[in-house]
Amino acid sequence: MVRVKDPAVRSLLIDRAAQMLAAREPVTLRSLVAGTGVSTMAVYTYFDGMDGLWRAVRQEGFTRLAARLAAVPPSADPVRDLAALGAAYLANALDGPDLYRVMFDAAFGLEDAAAADDTLHRLVRGVERATAAGRLRDDVDPLELAAQSWTIGHGLASLVATGPLPRRALAHGVPLLTALFAGAGDDPVRCRRSVERGWRPLLPGSRSGSADSGFSDAGPAGTAPEDVT
Amino acid sequence: MVRVKDPAVRSLLIDRAAQMLAAREPVTLRSLVAGTGVSTMAVYTYFDGMDGLWRAVRQEGFTRLAARLAAVPPSADPVRDLAALGAAYLANALDGPDLYRVMFDAAFGLEDAAAADDTLHRLVRGVERATAAGRLRDDVDPLELAAQSWTIGHGLASLVATGPLPRRALAHGVPLLTALFAGAGDDPVRCRRSVERGWRPLLPGSRSGSADSGFSDAGPAGTAPEDVT
DNA sequence: CCACAATACATAACGTTGCTATGTTCTGAG
DNA sequence: CTCAGAACATAGCAACGTTATGTATTGTGG
């Protein structure tokens, strides 16, 4: 009586959708199933239509993000780790800008809301570590500071990955996070060094080079090592 | 030989599209022209298709934003004015979340790129005023600080207007901007007061109350008057 | 072990989408 | 006044997501 749907087909379709998304090919019902052997009805058996598919893709996006954040190794410097978390967040967004966009497409809900919360919770724990280490004033609410860090990360990701700012604007992350954490109690110069260390993996040329253009000239953000101390 | 197209029809369609967008009705070619007396071909005569219409709508979004920013009266406190600019930016985004989204839909270009640059340039001038008034260190690049303020504004707008953060998360703008400007040289307590003044119009209940939900509990950001000084 | 019932899946059709082709109306310069 | 060309309406096209219908497959109760 109970037939179990093949999970392999599910993840096959999700992966293929994410892949087509990354390749900037239009993801349509028919183009999605073309070449997979399954018919268009599979999308309805497994996802209840395209909306369900997008919901699943959105979920997959958060899963990948969580994996990225989990891969950040904790060091002895919790502030550096916070910046590294932000850098990992941005690296994930830049790796798949289109996937990142559907992640924040409010039109579709999430299948497992806890997966999305996990993103923020990991940041919260990072802040708590920094507070426990005495780097931050102990009256700062970890949840608030985490949300503020997220705001900076998402703003940067949104403007760079899918927006008008050029890739070198990623360098803004350093002064922004430095100002935030220093404002939360960390020693300014020490904070700057920690953030720079955590942010470093994002700057050189670690990953895919998407060619952004910007509105016209959104500003040289690459070279200005001293504006916030 | 030269027939001039009626500009009234143009703005009629743009306004109607923006209106339908705000009403969360799907904007389709046929639904757009329905009831206007013009036929579907008008969209092609005036906009060269739907893509052109979206481009025009995007432009309209930036025009409205520019008008909002221009309506911010300069005061004697340039840092307060910077925060007020950010508040106006967010108020505009919250007034029409869907319009705000298409503004940053990179799929369509802009007809007049200068209109978009105007947004950033107004911020740049605000920073220059603050520097000239001696509130900021004079080695800060106005363009950079403006871009960083924009990052905060866009991150907050994106996460609140069309994302998972509840409306009360707007309060994060105060500590974020305070940290940024204080990090750029302003006196911390004075900065805080200035930012709070500029940000105030956003907080009470000045405009439309959209019912956001958040992932599950994205954090109480409403009451914490002292975390950054 | 077998027959039944429900699920999984394929095929075909439906309504709607953006768009184009064709024909008609109207404008404005020569 | 004439007529080339722009503006516009109507009709039709391929492609989209979805639904309806029919077939195959599978787990289980008799």
Image (cartoon, coloured by chain):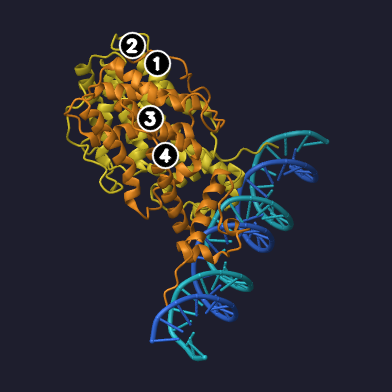
Chain colours: A yellow, B orange, C blue, D cyan
Residue type at numbered disc 2: Thr
- For the residues marked 1 and 3, what is the alpha-carbon distance in whole angstroms? 27 Å
Check whether the beta carbons of the residues at disc 1 and disc 3 lie within 8 A of each other: no
- Residue placed under numbered mark 4 in the picture: B68
- For the residues marked 2 and 1, what is the alpha-carbon distance in whole angstroms? 8 Å
Check whether the beta carbons of the residues at disc 4 and disc 2 lie within 8 A of each other: no
Q: Secondary structure at mark 2?
A: helix
Q: Are marks 4 and 1 on the same chain?
A: no
- Residue placed under numbered mark 1 in the picture: A142
Of callouts 3 and 4, which one flags the residue occurring earlier in the amino acid sequence? 4
- For the residues marked 3 and 2, what is the alpha-carbon distance in whole angstroms? 32 Å
Q: Of the residues tagged 3 and 2, which is closer to the observer? A: 3
- Residue placed under numbered mark 3 in the picture: B84
Residue type at numbered disc 4: Arg
Q: Which chain is mark 3 on?
A: B
On residue A131, the disc is 2
